[in-house]
Image (cartoon, rainbow, N blue to C red):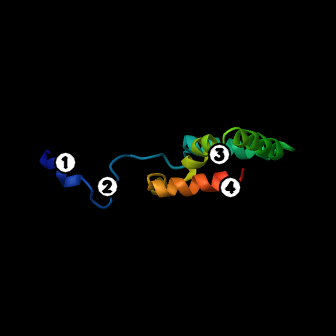
Amino acid sequence: MHKEDTDTRFKKGNPGGPGRKPGSVGGRRLILQELDRVLAQEGNVEKFSNACQDEFNKDPLAFWYKYGMPLLPQGFVLGTTEDVEIIVKMLDADH
């Protein structure tokens, strides 16, 4: 590592890059805003709920992996097999 690199790395006030421009919106936030807009339309919450239920009924575990796990904090997702067993039991209890 060069001396000039060590002089500025990990120091207070040096974020390491320009970052996002003030007022800009990331892709995830844009998607959530669009989902809010769509769900605000008459009847769409019920349609969405029914579609989710249909997918869940086909395969609860696959539904969990596809839609539930991405919403969990990373530490939980990388947890023990006991965590997975608890989730499977919860899903099985609904059947």
Reading the chain from its start, which is encountered first: label 4 or label 3? 3
Q: Which residue is mark 2?
A: 14
Give the mark nearer the N terminus: 4 vs 1: 1
Distance (Cα) linking label 4 and label 3: 30 Å
Work out whether mark 1 precedes mark 3 in sequence or the reverse, and give the earlier one.
1
Q: Nearer the viewer, mark 2 or mark 4?
A: 4
Residue under pointer 1: 5
User: Extreme right residue here?
Assistant: 42
Q: CA distance from mark 2 to mark 4?
A: 51 Å
Q: Amino acid at mark 1?
A: Asp
Q: Nearer the viewer, residue 44 or 89?
A: 89
Percent across and percent down for residue 71 are 57, 51
The quarter holding residue 10 reads: bottom left
Distance from Cα at disc 2 to Cα at disc 3:
31 Å
Q: Nearer the viewer, residue 75 or 63?
A: 63
What amino acid is found at the position of numbered circle 2 in the picture?
A: Asn
